[in-house]
Image (cartoon, rainbow, N blue to C red):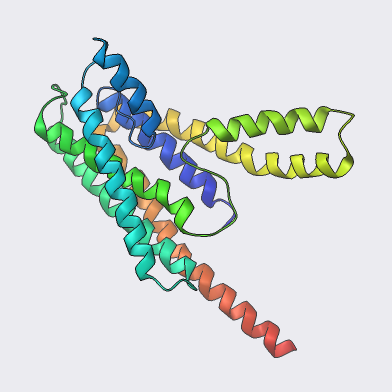
Amino acid sequence: MKSEDSLLAAIAGYVDTLSFVALFGLFTAHVTGNFVLIGAEAAGFGQGVFMKLMAFPAFVAGVAVSSVLVKRVEPATPNRAACVLYVVQAVLMLAFCLAGVGVSPVVHADSTPVIVCGMIGAAAMGVQNAHGRLVPRPGVPNTVMTGNVTQAVLDTIDILSPQMPSDARAAARTRLGKMLPTIIAFAAGAILGALAYRHAGFWALLLPCVVLLWLALKAPGAQTQLAVSGTVTDARR
């Protein structure tokens, strides 16, 4: 599905921004950001350092569970593995939503229910980070945009450079066409996540739940379509 990376990027931006706004600067999809915040808080800036520390093992647990589940699925059925991971992430996202509603209004960063809430969110995004590495398919990274933005800038320079060979320029143009929608979707998701939290609180996490379940339903459909196409091609031969 062509829009899959864009939808996942939008989810990552949406959830990461919502958790950052709601949980004292916690990044659920961006482990590097939490390391930076932990360092800042160790020097006396900010709050919620223990929650950010606990988010790391929760993120790792999400990645580990994803790996175990994918290994149990037949390697010849990547769409089935994708479906399983989408469902797992949707369930964790729903748990994140309900946990957040349960602790609202969030006042104390070191409260145990608030820490558990953040850990569930980190586990959910750990699943999404693992998804792109465990399920083989053409696409671009959809949870962290640093590499995508860097590549997009380099490709733009190559496209505009008259010294570049035509084949290299064409490859850069193709790459840029894949990167830009993901970058834009992540930015749009980040804005929407902040606005949604302002108006709906943690209930706003129901939106990515619905999108993930829709992606799960589309994954086995794609596999069926490929099988049918293969059967038709064989019949024509």
Could one spot residue 149 in this view of the protein? yes
Q: How many marks?
A: 0
Residue at 41% x, 61% y: name it: 216
Residue at 69% x, 39% y: name it: 176
Residue 19: image location, x then y, percent: 30, 31
Q: Is residue 94 left or right of residue 139?
A: left
Could one spot residue 195 in this view of the protein? no
**Which part of the image, by quadrant, shows the C terminus?**
bottom right
Residue 234: image location, x then y, percent: 68, 87
Residue 121: image location, x then y, percent: 27, 40
The relative height of residue 135 versus residue 74 in the rendered view (above or below) is above
Where on the picture, by quarter, is residue 160? top right
Residue at 74% x, 88% y: name it: 236
Where on the picture, by quarter, is residue 80? bottom left
Residue in the foreground of this view, choosing between 208 and 13? 13
Where on the picture, by quarter, is residue 153? top right
Residue 71: image location, x then y, percent: 38, 66
**Which part of the image, by quadrant, shows the N terminus?**
bottom right
The relative height of residue 25 versus residue 140 in the rendered view (above or below) is above
Residue in the foreground of this view, choosing between 207 and 173? 173
